[in-house]
Amino acid sequence: MLQKLRDRTTGWAATVIIGLLMIPFLFVIDHSYMGGMGANDAAQVKAPPSWWQGAPSWWPVSLLWEHREVSVEEFRQRFEQERMQQRQQQGEAFDPREFESVENKRKVLDGLIDEKVLLLAAERAGVTIGDAAVRSYIEGIPAFQVDGKFDATRYQLALSSQMPPRTPKEFEGLVRESLRQSLIPVGLGTSAFVTQAEVDRMVRLSGEKRDVEAVLLPEQAEDTAPVTDADIGGWYEAHKQDFMRPETVTIEYVEVGAEQLPAPAEADDAVLRKRYEDEKSRFVEPEGRLASHILVRVDAGADEATRKAAEEKAARLAAEAKAPGADFAALAKANSEDPGSRDNGGDLGWVEKGVMVAPFEQALFAMQAGEVRGPVQTDFGYHVLQLREVRTGAQVPFEQAREELAREQAQADRERAYSELTGRLTDLIYQNPSTLEPAAKEVGLQVQRIGPFSRENTVGVAASPEVKRAAFSESLIEDGTASDPIEIGPNHSVVIRVVEHAPEQARPLAEVREQVIAAVRADRRTKAAEAAAEALVKRVQAGEALSAVAASAGAEVVPMPGLPRGAPAPSPEANKAIFEAPVPVEGKPSAGRFALPGGRQALFAVNAVHPGNPEELSKEQREQLRSQLAQIDGAAAAEAYVRQLRKQFTVAVQESQL
């Protein structure tokens, strides 16, 4: 039978039939085998085969297309890395719900797509990275170095502590891929250059100053014209976002803090003595020396002759201090150059180890009580030391340490009681997370309620950033279950549950009617002020003197000679408008207008333009500016390269996987 089947399936006719039968299977096979989007992909970058750049994406042999995928796992890892980075940068201001926006997800995904685009382009261009380049790059990473040199043990430990842990081979693969995809854009970025003419042009533009005259126009009269229902309705519909009722929540909560805890019982001596014995090493009075000194100061850059003279002076003072009946304090007051101790006769008080510089400390702790020694050289100069008294390290008795031990034990008892109460409350809430009442009653605490409140209007425990963040979190709003304990202070936490939620919504027109009318009138007033100011500008542009135009408007001209570009004067927006105005020609000023905060209008006339002077730059400043401009141009070239590649390749995104 098998032989008959074989005989009937040979020959050109059978081949054609089998080929035709295979075509339907092309449409049911997992597309990932054919270069299509796989089930676990968030995005895919595809390029036609290099030997047929114009191949259409629908061609049946699209399996010949080159492609790279962004897996869902890869996207999620990068998204979590970005989350951690944003949390560190923003601290308490970080909003997890806002971070989860579609815009943020697409931004992270776009970055990964760019990497895949660069990698695919590098492969098509034949870019390869040798082992030596990978090794050199890894050895240059500071995290893998000890004392500035690559350390294999540090390298292994760093890789094993990553999340997820990686083997050296895996990490080398990542480095190789990163170098491969960045080689061309980095090359573009570093190859950028700027000519002297471009530097000069930038200096002339950035250093430009303008002689300006400004006129602050009187405020426009209040709008008193009737506002019709049509005006009100039209404005309301066009500006609903200005009349929104903010999202609000009402929460119930159970608070656990110091005031809910009974005062701990006073610990008995047995407990305190055990604590004392367990921590006996803490209660040791450190070894010390009661010392005085005389300093003959020497500056760090002093020459050898100056140092020699200072040393001889210190030796002479040491000899005087050692003489029978010598008054060390009097010598210090008369000769010491240490302003901190001179007036006290050189007294340094009790000196413990680790406080003074090494040569000073070594000499002092090698002396006997009553001894004078010197000169002792340090970075400050030469010292003459007097050791007045020695205090050896001694064990502090229990009776002397008892008060501190009792205070620490009471604090430990309070913390333990707080931890036990919080843990018990949490366990009970987990048994029935849809309500707080039974658990609170079981542990003797009260359920309290706050709300409704918005993100901007919070009171009490809701004012805590952590509580507010949890109260407006999607999980608590949707589930209606209790949160985990939220710490809002030392030994102070709350468990909350959202009981009511009102999303952001437009307030009804009837409620905001007066606000809408005020907005319509304010808009009319602004437009009237702009129209009046524009009419005055046209008069100046027609050749009328600014002073005459100002007088007709009941205003005065304010000269502003030498106004620099970018100065926040009269305001950042005003400066921008002034420097966007054309350069005056043939002695005719260039006129314009700008609005000040609050809507008040002002006229201006540019009478002269003074470009920056490239000759005023030093050689170092010129080179620094050239480098900065080259970096900007290089970054723009690299970015343009990536944008162009994305136009050449086909990018598919699976939104449902984000």
Image (cartoon, rainbow, N blue to C red):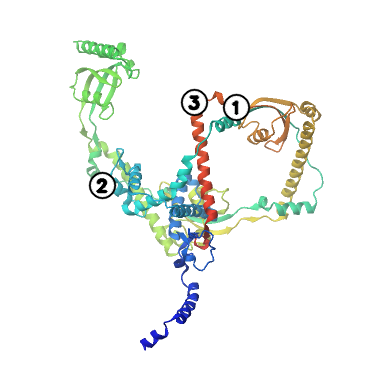
Q: Earlier in the sequence, mark 2 or mark 1?
A: 2
For the N terminus, the image quarter is bottom left
Q: Which residue is mark 1?
A: 612
Near mark 3 (Cα within 10 A), the count class, few <14, some 14-19 or many ≥20, is few
Q: Along the line of sight, which residue is nearer the eye, 102 or 585? A: 585
Numbered label attached to residue 619: 3
Q: Are marks 1 and 3 in contact (CB under 8 Å)?
A: no
Near mark 1 (Cα within 10 A), the count class, few <14, some 14-19 or many ≥20, is some
Q: Residue at x 19, y 21 (%)?
A: 369
Q: Along the line of sight, which residue is nearer the eye, 576 or 241? A: 576
* 512 vs 198: above or below: below
Question: How much space separates mark 1 and mark 3, taking CA atoms?
Answer: 16 Å
Residue 633 at x, y percent in the picture = 53, 40
Q: Secondary structure at mark 2?
A: helix
Which image quadrant is residue 10 in?
bottom left
Amino acid type, label 1: Gly
90 to the left or right of 265: right
Question: How much space separates mark 3 and mark 2, taking CA atoms?
Answer: 75 Å
Q: Which residue is mark 2?
A: 271
Q: Secondary structure at mark 3?
A: helix
Residue 351 at x, y percent in the picture = 27, 26
529 to the left or right of 160: right
Residue 352 at x, y percent in the picture = 26, 28
Residue 118 at x, y percent in the picture = 47, 52
* 419 vs 324: above or below: below
Q: Secondary structure at mark 1?
A: loop
Amino acid type, label 2: Val
Which image quadrant is residue 592 in?
top right
Numbered label attached to residue 248: none
